[in-house]
Image: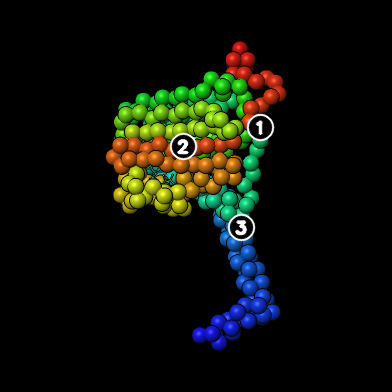
Amino acid sequence: VFFSILIVSDYSKSQVYKKQLEIANFKTKNLLKSREQLISTVSHDLKTPLSTIVGYSELLGNSDVNTKQSYFIKNIKNSSEYITQLVQDLLDFSKIEAGKITIEKVPFLLPEIIEDVAVNIQSVYKQKNIDLIINVDEKFQKRIVGDPFRLKQILSNIIGNAYKFTEEGHIRVAAYANEEDTFTISIQDTGIGIERENQKLVFEEFAQANENIEKKYGGTGLGLSICQKIISILGGTLSLDSIFGKGSTFTIQLPLLFDESQPNSLNEVKS
Ligand code: ADP
């Protein structure tokens, strides 16, 4: 045993081993690069025809069609929207993996972003009996500096999930400033909840709490993993607190920086 350890340790120091390691690293890097290029090219090529399908099925759906036709058109639209989301998720995912994701730093009004996203999603799920409650700290009348586009993307995902997995009750979105220059946005729902043993799993790529979820609600299992990665790039954290059968709370914590330039208040902007 001692002899073979000696051989192994000598081998790990040898030039041959170093060269082999270099080649392996080079090959892995190249493989990752071509995978990223493949995903990115295919995704871009899929996006245009997909938006044509979604657009035309929307137009058809609004025209004079019978119930059967309307059902078919709705299915075409839902499926193509699902593929569009999957393509977007894959694009984001490969960009994050390649370290190519871009983050902006611009002034914006947090209440506007939260309301935009929440009200938009609420309109999609208007047939559900869910109260939307939004509580945003007064302090956010003042602009903050960050990436409003990424924040919208994150909130759309998490608030979208809250609506998707809740049949009745409420969804509460709250935002408040913390000490230590951070702020919190929590999204609490009274939905199906997530079993304790699956609570870590849902942040992994392509993971869903169980296969019944996939059958009943669809989805790609990529959303939360992308959110968590983007939040971490933004210097924040995403956590989950859930009771199975009762509901879930997703909590986002991000660095807080108020914009000191003009104009700075929500009232000023609205008046
Ligand atoms: P997707 O929703 O596309 O499946 P996500 O990554 O957004 O992918 O979510 C992963 C899984 O986490 C979901 O499939 C579901 O099982 C669970 N999940 C996420 N949000 C909620 C929620 N608010 N309530 C219950 N389960 C949730």
State the quadrant of the C terminus.
Answer: top right
Label 3: few (<14), some (14–19) or many (≥20) C-alpha neighbours in 10 Å: some
Q: Indicate how the structure is coloured in the image.
A: rainbow
Where residue 18 sits in the image (x, y, percent)? Answer: 66, 75
Label 2 CB less than 8 angstroms from ligand 1: no
Residue type of the residue flagged with mark 2: Thr
Type of amino acid under label 1:
Val
Query: Which residue does the image show at 39% across and 40% down from the upper left?
Result: 241
Who's the residue at 36% across and 40% down the image? Answer: 242
Earlier residue among tags 1 and 3: 3
Q: Is residue 64 left or right of residue 229?
A: left
Q: Which mark is residue 251?
A: 2
- Ligand 1's quadrant is top left
Which quadrant of the view contains residue 25? bottom right
Residue tagged by mark 1? Answer: 106
Q: In this figure, which residue is indicated by the disc labeled 3?
A: 37
Is disc 1 surrounded by few (<14), some (14 to 19) or many (20+) residues within 10 Å?
Answer: few
Looking at the image, is mark 2 or mark 1 earlier in the sequence? Answer: 1
Q: Give the CA distance from mark 2 to mark 3.
A: 33 Å
Label 1: element kind: strand
Q: Which is nearer the N-term, disc 2 or disc 3?
A: 3
**Residue 190 x/y as whole percent:** 33, 33
Residue depicted at 56% across the width and 36% down the height:
254
